[in-house]
Image: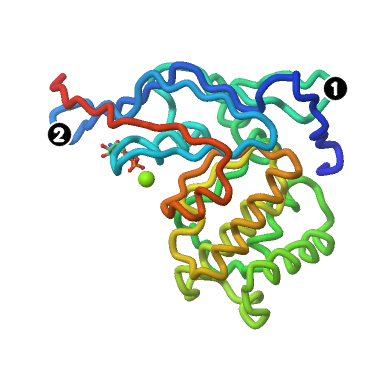
Amino acid sequence: MDESIDMSFAADDGPMLRARGIAKTFVLHTQGGASLSALSGVDLDVSRGECVALVGPSGAGKSTLLRCLFGNYLVSEGSIEVRDPIGSERRYVSLTRASPHEVMRIRRDIIGYVSQFLRVIPRVPTLDLVAEPLIARGIDGDDARERARAWLARLNIPERLWHLAPATFSGGEQQRVNIARGLIAEHPVLLLDEPTASLDASNRAVVAEVIAEARGRGAAIVGIFHDETARAQVATRCLELVPASTLACA
Ligand code: ADP
Ligand code: MG
């Protein structure tokens, strides 16, 4: 149940997210097995209330790091651990050693992710799409949809759209649905891939506000913020990535 998630860690409990020596090499099987190093030697600690912005030129590995931190990509080297808010021990759980089942549990309870583009599920109404992460936690459907309505209203999604699937929505509307879905469950760790990229100024301001509120409740956030104004508004510090790529033939 959602209610059992305890965010009241003391500051000296250590970071919420701890990544050490992360390397990611892609092996291009369709291109003679060439390997491409996208990340190497990345260390990152993120504490409660922090928002770390990943910066660096295109191709530096920002999106790759975010995908590793969500367990979408297996790392080639290194370890990623997150603090588990469930239970009294407040132990770290390893994402890099987790079974697929445990990865699903970590995503339900600990790590929320706002991808750059909404993955549209055909025919699922927007309201249900946004309520789903709460329902997965065992929250009653009516309560979950009530909270989803509040998020959609806050993010300026017109009410006439709430019962439609977002496939036909504009890019900015889809992105705001994605943000509502990513933030509704108040995960202790949040990963945000360009959450403001296709928004107008007033919606960017709303999203900056909800990110600041997430920090205020103690979320540990890692994000990619294309636009410097948004980054300056929400980030507490930056982690600079440099392109690690060295193309080597295997
Ligand atoms: P950024 O988000 O900083 O622009 P990316 O993380 O998207 O950078 O990419 C970093 C490097 O890794 C790039 O050289 C990119 O081509 C490569 N890369 C990313 N994803 C893959 C993949 N799935 N397969 C092969 N190479 C990839
Ligand atoms: Mg990217």
Give coordinates of residue 37: x percent, y percent. Answer: 27, 26
Q: Is residue 247 left or right of residue 221?
A: left
Quarter of the picture containing the N terminus is top right
Give coordinates of residue 98: x percent, y percent. Answer: 58, 23
Q: Is residue 140 left or right of residue 162?
A: right
Q: Write down the quadrant of residue 132 in the picture.
A: bottom right
Q: Write down the quadrant of residue 47 in the picture.
A: top right
Q: Please identify, in this view, whether the residue under mark 1 or under mark 2 is nearer the observer.
A: 1
Residue drawn 51% across and 66% down?
174
Foreground of the two, 92 or 49: 49
| Tag 2 residue | 31
Sequence order check, earlier mark of 1 and 2: 2
Compared with 106, 231 (above or below) is below
- Residue 216 image label: none
Give coordinates of residue 136: x percent, y percent. Answer: 72, 48
- Residue 88 image label: 1
Estimate the spatial distance between the alpha carbons at disc 1 and disc 2, rounded to whole Å: 49 Å
Residue drawn 51% across and 62% down?
175
- Per the image, label 2 sits on a secondary structure element best described as helix
Foreground of the two, 185 or 201: 201
Foreground of the two, 165 or 87: 87
Residue type at the position of mark 1: Ser
Give coordinates of residue 234: x percent, y percent. Answer: 58, 48
Quarter of the picture containing the C terminus is top left
Compared with 220, 27 (above or below) is above
